[in-house]
Image (cartoon, grey):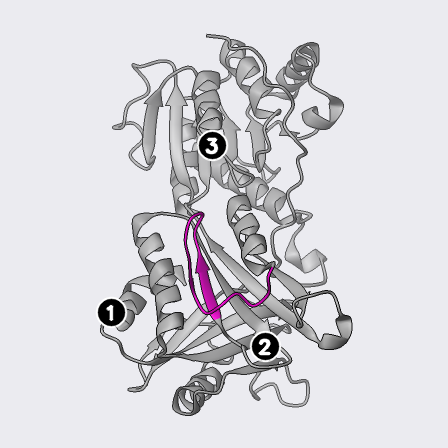
Amino acid sequence: MIDIAAELEEWCADGRPFALATVVEVTGSAPRPPGTCVAVDATGRVLGSLSGGCVEGAVYNLALDVLETGVPQRVSFGYSDSDAFAVGLSCGGVIDIVVRRVGDEPARQALRVVLDALAEGRPVALATVVESPAEGLGSLRALTPSVAAGDPPAHPDADRTSRALLARGSGGTHRYAADGGCDPTAGELTVLTSVYSSPPRMLVYGAIDFAGAAARVGRFLGYHVTVCDAREVFTTPERFPDADEVVVDWPHRHLRSLADNGALDERTVVCVLTHDAKFDLPLLDLALRLPLGYVGAMGSRRTHAQRLEALRATGLTEHQLARLHSPIGLDIGANTPEETAVSIAAEIIAARTGAGSRPLRTTDGPIHRPAAPLNPGPPAELPNSHD
């Protein structure tokens, strides 16, 4: 929804009815993830895309039908072996889409809460009923840490579950007994919670030329990029124009401050490029104790071996040390700062998705895949400050 938020805000503000089509389930390889939305109004204007073109025409016609009848629908689109030009996904996957009319006050109120939060950079969740044995298909409920708005809760536990996903920073699908209890004979109620939160952080430590290239790639990938170094003469906004923030501080102290302020989560990426043990060791000692998405460090294999020995002496476990990506990046023959940044970015993506980092021509199975669940374990007691 983020990609159509500005235009959708106008539609909600002027009160026009529209149909909202949402990807609610993906099987196999498909171009867009669950939570992707398209809106169609009565004039035929379209916002967004669900499949990169594969099923847009069919969804468009379905949206116009739902807009006219007011009856929500759930449909599946997949590849047709008998007719490759039939409605379907040429990439071989299957997507399920729920389409509902937005014209009533509760649904519009839910979307306004979501759109306002997106405009202000606040985290918000949108819960959509994607399967129901009775009425309620397509119902919308928006949740922030303190506000719930829209259609009534689909299940007594639904708000609690959606807020838990919001706190974690990633959405998910949950199934409930439709009677509000645990009776499976009552039918199944399924709720998709889409979470929209602030951009994930990329923390680049070390004000060197490789950091400038890493900042450019990180920003391109959608990260909020911070470059930090304790050496003031090198750590300037002019040297790192692609960074969202340039901070002069000791790296471990900066990371500790973010952790203490609740600014880190399982999406956070840390790239240690300083090449200096007095910076690297206290920083890595802290980073590997935190539930971060990725921790990588630049250096030779000899430097890496020495680091591991020093970090073991601080009390880090083998499980924690195994989370360190060092030497940083994938082996693609990178030499320049820009090539190295691509190598680092590729490893970050592979770590997030759980991919094997092999050429696609040597693999089978889905090309598009969701992120693998992050489970770095609970953080241990943080080390004492090394100011």
Sequence-wise first label, 1 or 2: 1
As drawn, 346 above or below 78: above
Could you say which is closer to the camera, residue 241 or residue 369? 369
- Quadrant (top left, top right, bottom left, bottom right) of the N terminus: bottom left
> Of helix, strand and loop, which one carries label 1?
helix
Instruction: Using the image, tell me which numbered label, if any, was put on residue 263.
Output: none
Q: Relative to 333, is 209 on the left or the right?
A: left
Q: Residue at x 64, y 71 (%)?
A: 189
* Range of magenta residues: 140-156
Could you say which is closer to the camera, residue 383 or residue 95? 383
Instruction: Using the image, tell me which numbered label, if any, was put on residue 90.
Output: 2
Q: Residue at x 49, y 34 (%)?
A: 264
**Residue 79 shown in magenta:** no
Residue identified by numbered label 3: 262
Q: Residue at x 29, y 34 (%)?
A: 241
Which numbered disc, 1 or 2, marks the residue closer to the eye?
A: 1
Q: Amino acid at mark 1?
A: Ala
